Amino acid sequence: MAGAAGRVRTIGEGHILDALAGAVSGGGPVVLATIIDTEGSVPRHAGTKMVVAADGTSIGTIGGGTVEATIRIDALAVLASRRPAMKEYVLQDPTRGDVGVCGGTMCVYLEPYMAPHTVYIIGAGHVGRAVVDLAHWLGYRTVVVDDRTELVSEDAMPNADERFAGTVEDALVSIPVTEATSIVVVTRSHDLDARITPILLDTSARYIGVMGSRRRWEATREQLGGEGISSGDMDRIHNPIGIDIAAETVEEIAVSIMSEVIAAVNEDL
């Protein structure tokens, strides 16, 4: 933590919001720390901003020294909770635990900016396209993967933010999965599901759902169990995928799937 806290890139105040927008669009959650009020002698004025990334690095400065290191730590707690916080920092007497010696106080607002959650759709058939379209409309970042190039073209998948034609293994290298990812498996093949499930279980995805009947999934579980995949690990998989709304059309199935994804994404909020 100390090493990360020491890496600071100082830039002009006018570029802070540009840095914030760039960090979020690039997929990295950040905290915007803004001094909203001061009293007495402090290193920076009200309105000064700093961006803190998830690895503890920062862009800009709102004071330096111990107070800034403490603000970075508090910013990481805000990222973990995904809730903003107001903090007061006293810079008077370090012997009693204060974070500075300037003589004043700073009130800092810590505001998290989370990148859009990613819905990673494996399988670009009719259901896959419907999920891409609905997830995009809901404001999620969408990734679609299929080894059939014609199904993941821009014309075929206009609402996908990223398209990958090739194997799932290669896709996961090119477009990594994080804990801010939900994986929707809607392939055409039981054998493919069985092959990729251990790979998907190795990711930190928040949600993994696999389309198919209970019988098809039980056959997959039995095959994977024979390959050494534990029952506990396979319990991460949602199957049948989606919330039961008696869906029939591909659009209704997409609603069912995305309802379950939304529930998983918002579970801790």
Image (cartoon, rainbow, N blue to C red):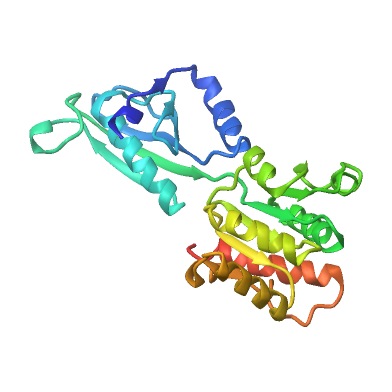
Q: Position of residue 85 (x, y in %)?
A: 39, 48
Task: Tell me if I can see residue 113 in this picture.
Answer: yes
Q: Position of residue 27 (x, y in %)?
A: 59, 39
- Residue drawn where x is 56% and y is 64% of the image: 227
Left or right? Give the position of 37 relative to 228.
left
- Residue drawn where x is 83% and y is 60% of the image: 130
Q: Work out which residue is located at the far front of the displayed protein and give it.
A: 226
The quarter of the displayed image where residue 59 is located = top left
Check the image and report above or below for 254 versus 52. below
Counting the numbered discs, the total is: 0
- Residue drawn where x is 42% and y is 50% of the image: 80
Camera-nearest residue between 56 and 94: 56
Q: Position of residue 245 (x, y in %)?
A: 74, 80
Camera-nearest residue between 177 and 149: 149
Q: Quadrant of the N terminus?
A: top left
Camera-nearest residue between 101 and 27: 27
Q: Position of residue 213 (x, y in %)?
A: 74, 78
Left or right? Give the position of 8 relative to 137.
left
The quarter of the displayed image where residue 26 is located = top right
Check the image and report above or below for 46 versus 112. above
- Residue drawn where x is 79% and y is 71% of the image: 253
Left or right? Give the position of 12 relative to 172.
left
Check the image and report above or below for 212 versus 136. below
Task: Tell me if I can see residue 183 in this picture.
Answer: no
Left or right? Give the position of 157 relative to 220.
right
The quarter of the displayed image where residue 248 is located = bottom right
